[in-house]
Image (cartoon, rainbow, N blue to C red):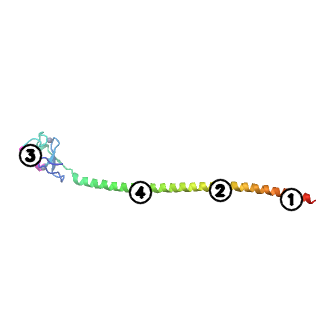
Amino acid sequence: MRCVICTDLFDTGIGIVSTQCGHVFHSKCLFKWIDRSKTCPECRGPVSSKNVSKLYFSFAPDDDLNTAHLENDMCTLKAKLREKDMELESSRKKIEELRLHAANFEKILHIMHQKEFELQVELYDTKQNLKDLANLETKLQKLKQ
Ligand SMILES: [Zn+2]
Ligand SMILES: [Zn+2]
């Protein structure tokens, strides 16, 4: 923002005034102007020293402070976001690991079931063989008699 009378910036936030029409100037510039003219240098509306109000904003330092605060907040938020991303990534890895483990267990379980089945078949065969053997033995006993 600039004062249209002297074309300088309102850099300090001090010594700034507003006219009735709402235009803003350096107080020293405007009072010098009013000495010569009773119209606003911007809009040519009527101005008088009675209707000039002082403005007390200190926008420059506040803005800097706010920007610094916001940048700080952004930094903190970004850091938090990165942390959460890393947590999510490690959680994903753990889930993937667990899935692999589960798949391995499934395989092992399948193999065990197969072994169990094979053993049952073997057991049946052995029992059958024992029966045959017993039959042979009775036959042998009968032959001996
Ligand atoms: Zn000025
Ligand atoms: Zn004006």
Q: Earlier in the sequence, mark 2 or mark 3?
A: 3
Image quadrant occupied by the C terminus = bottom right
Residue on which disc 1 sits? 137
Q: Earlier in the sequence, mark 1 or mark 2?
A: 2
Under mark 2, the amino acid is: Met
Query: In what element is the residue under mark 3?
Result: helix
Labels in figure, total:
4
- Contact between marks 4 and 1 (CB within 8 A): the answer is no
Q: Earlier in the sequence, mark 3 or mark 1?
A: 3
For disc 2, the neighbor class at 10 Å (few under 14, some 14 to 19, many from 20) is few
Q: Is residue 32 left or right of residue 81?
A: left
Query: In what element is the residue under mark 2?
Result: helix
Disc 1 or disc 2, which is closer to the eye?
A: 1
Under mark 1, the amino acid is: Glu
Residue on which disc 3 sits? 33
- Contact between marks 1 and 2 (CB within 8 A): the answer is no
Disc 4 or disc 1, which is closer to the eye?
A: 1
Disc 3 or disc 4, which is closer to the eye?
A: 4
Residue on which disc 4 sits? 83
Name the residue: 71% across, 56% down. 119
Q: Earlier in the sequence, mark 4 or mark 1?
A: 4
**What's the CA distance linking mark 4 and mark 2?**
43 Å
**What's the CA distance linking mark 2 and mark 3?**
101 Å
- The disc placed on residue 112 is 2
Q: Indicate yes or no whether the magenta region holds residue 75.
A: no
Question: For the magenta stretch, what is the residue range?
Answer: 27-36
- Contact between marks 2 and 3 (CB within 8 A): the answer is no
Q: Indicate yes or no whether the magenta region holds residue 29.
A: yes
Name the residue: 50% across, 56% down. 94
Q: Earlier in the sequence, mark 3 or mark 4?
A: 3
The front one of 144 and 28 is: 144
